[in-house]
Image (cartoon, rainbow, N blue to C red):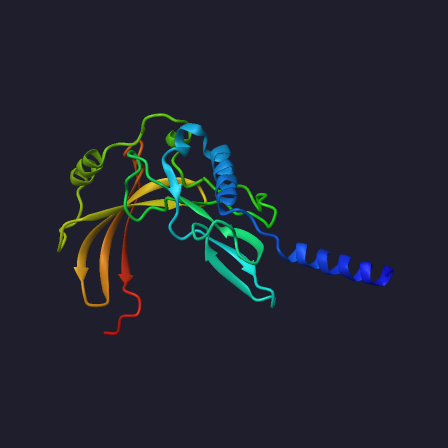
Amino acid sequence: MKRTLTILILILTSELSFSQTHLTSEVIEKAEFYLKEAVGDSLFKYFELGPNSYYEYKTKSGKSKWKEITKGKKTKGKFVNGKNINFVLNHPDFQYPYVRKTVYVELDSNLNLIRDVYVDQIPEFLLRNEPSDWLSENKIDGIIKKKKLKKPVEPFSKRLEFDTKTKKYYWVVFNTLHKEKCFSDEEILNINPESGIILKHYEERQRIMHCSE
């Protein structure tokens, strides 16, 4: 009898340890809680759950699988982690293309944070809940036009980039001087978005990846 009881307890314990599931709404709410702690209540309202938010789980055979957190009322199998749960920032003062607006909230099996929420790429004025202190794109364009650049073969282009070392944004301006099938010669400016100061001015040949001449 004691042996039978011991076996039943072991089976029950095994089943409970395997069936570690969560309500999907609970996982999302927990991730939202940590995000709100990181960015503040005011900025939090401009985030929405990313379309590619997944969690990892294990099947009874021990195979790892992934599933979207929005699918189903409960997580499947044994919940391993929510490392790929993310939120996308959509703020009217930060509508620049090609800039990372996704913030990941990485959760462990118990829905605790694996690491601090990384928000360094969010402009400081947004985190401070203040109006943008960046120059408008029209003013940046005016600064570029006043600079005596070399004669281009096409209109200049620009994009906003983030320096992971300084944790600062800057404009990169491309003034194309010569263009071939697989490369172009560029006159490049780096401009501070707040002051309009030109940080760098140089020339560089840029090659197109996977292009054969």
**Quarter-wise, where is residue 57 in the image?**
bottom right
Residue 173 at x, y = what percent? 25, 47
Name the one closer to the observer, 83 or 115: 83
Judged left or right of residue 21, residue 140 is left
Residue at 81% x, 59% y is: 6
Residue 121 at x, y = what percent? 41, 41
Judged left or right of residue 111, residue 170 is left
Residue at 31% x, 66% y is: 209
Name the one closer to the observer, 74 or 160: 74
Residue 212 at x, y = what percent? 26, 74
Figure disc tally: 0
| Residue 124 visible (yes or no) | no
Decide: is 158 above or below 140. below
What quarter of the picture does the N terminus occupy? bottom right
| Residue 129 visible (yes or no) | yes
List the single residue furthest toward the right.
2
Residue 59 at x, y = what percent? 57, 63
Decide: is 211 above or below 116. below
Decide: is 63 above or below 31. below
Residue at 20% x, 49% y is: 157
Name the one closer to the observer, 134 or 9: 9
Judged left or right of residue 189, residue 64 is right
List the single residue furthest toward the front.
1
Judged left or right of residue 49, residue 203 is left
**Quarter-wise, where is residue 147 in the image?**
top left
